[in-house]
Image (tube, grey):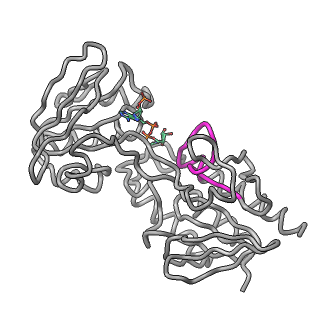
């Protein structure tokens, strides 16, 4: 079978595209990596800026998106894309288990994965106190001291979440102001068990078989300090999951697939939606909007081939 559209990724962009595709009566297959829909939203404790459902849990919102796509009859398959090719107008996507699927159009909605600090101890102690997901691992650090590294929305949201569970939260940020929204930053700064360590970076994470302390350097004074703690939550942004597509599709210097609001890439019939594409604002709502725009572009494309 040649599908009208294959959607790779089942975060807000991919699921929104699946919903719009089914409503447009297109044949659609969604490929999802982890067997769990929602992408980064799953790891978000609370989503307070999606219209109509203030304060909804990220996991709950993901389930709602998925249930909506299921209700309309979207088909899902689990797997990771290992190869991707184009033969005339038909695109073939091959998964790691060797199965292949064909479609006349593809929407890449693969989002990103957490960026690493690349400091000594990070890799060695990953899963032993070093975490990239506060909502997944926070409960392991009940009444303990932890640090959150980063100054964006994710770092600040993680720190607010962890402050409810942990004895104390250090937030280590490399500049003297947050990148996160002012609303979140204000909420964080009001918490009594949070210390913000400005202008500083982690130089080393210490511990034998679990995290015991971190070394921090102040970039302005070059002074070093050590903090005893049990957990380090790294929230320094994401890297686009575009590796499998770079040989065919144009990306920018950061690896994001170059595409505008209509999600068209440099290859006819291939679209990029959500955090994977070049854009100013990476939010759930802009990812969901991309899903809708991408399917609208797909419909126009299919009408003309
Ligand atoms: P982000 O906004 O790119 O922030 C990354 C943070 O990590 C920045 O503060 C950055 O510092 C810092 N950083 C980057 N590399 C570093 C390094 N090597 N060492 C130390 N610090 C480093 O990423 P994010 O917080 O993961 O958010 C991703 C996107 O999702 C953003 O667009 C965000 O707005 C969005 N988001 C939205 C919501 C929401 O709407 N509720 C929730 C979560 C995320 P600088 O500030 O100095 O660059």
In the image: residue 153, left or right of residue 214:
right
Along the line of sight, the residue nearer the viewer: 19 or 240: 240
The magenta stretch is 271-287
Within the displayed image, which quadrant is ligand 1 positioned in?
top left
Q: Quadrant of the N terminus?
A: bottom right
Q: Residue 273: horizontal and vertical position, in percent?
A: 64, 54
**In the picture shown, does residue 68 fall above or below 286?**
below
- Can residue 280 be found in the magenta stretch? yes
The outermost residue toward the top is: 221
Q: Is residue 107 left or right of residue 96?
A: right
Left or right: 139 in relation to 44: left
Residue 241 percent coordinates (x, y)? 52, 55
x, y percentage for residue 292? 69, 57
> In which quadrant of the rendered image does the C terminus lie?
bottom right
The verdict on residue 286 being magenta is: yes
Question: Residue sitting at 55 percent across and 59 percent down?
Answer: 110
């Amino acid at each position: 079978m040649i599908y009208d559209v294959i959607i790779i990724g089942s975060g807000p962009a991919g699921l929104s595209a699946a919903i719009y595709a089914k409503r447009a009566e297109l044949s659609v297959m969604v490929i999802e990596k982890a067997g769990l829909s929602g992408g980064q939203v799953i790891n978000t404790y609370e989503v307070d800026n999606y219209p109509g459902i203030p304060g909804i849990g990220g996991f709950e919102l993901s389930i709602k998106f998925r249930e909506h796509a299921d209700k309309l009859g979207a088909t899902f398959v689990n797997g990771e894309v290992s190869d991707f090719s184009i033969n005339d107008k038909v695109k073939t996507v091959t998964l790691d288990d060797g199965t292949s699927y064909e479609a006349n159009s593809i929407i890449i909605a693969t989002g990103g994965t957490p960026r690493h600090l690349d400091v000594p101890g990070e890799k060695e102690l990953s899963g032993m106190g070093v975490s990239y997901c506060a909502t997944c691992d926070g409960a392991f650090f009940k009444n303990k001291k932890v640090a959150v590294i980063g100054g964006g929305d994710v770092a600040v949201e993680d720190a607010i979440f962890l402050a409810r569970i942990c004895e104390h939260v250090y937030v280590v940020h490399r500049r003297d102001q947050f990148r996160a929204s002012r609303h979140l930053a204000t909420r964080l700064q009001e918490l009594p068990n949070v210390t913000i360590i400005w202008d500083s970076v982690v130089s080393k994470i210490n511990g034998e078989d679990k995290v015991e302390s971190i070394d921090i350097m102040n970039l302005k004074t070059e002074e070093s300090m050590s903090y005893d703690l049990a957990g380090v939550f790294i929230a320094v942004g994401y890297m686009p999951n575009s590796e499998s597509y770079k040989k065919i599709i144009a990306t920018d210097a950061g690896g994001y697939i170059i595409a505008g609001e209509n999600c068209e890439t440099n290859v006819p019939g291939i679209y990029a939606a959500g955090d994977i594409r070049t854009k100013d604002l990476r939010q759930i709502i802009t990812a969901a909007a991309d899903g809708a725009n991408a399917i609208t572009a797909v419909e126009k494309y299919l009408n003309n081939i």
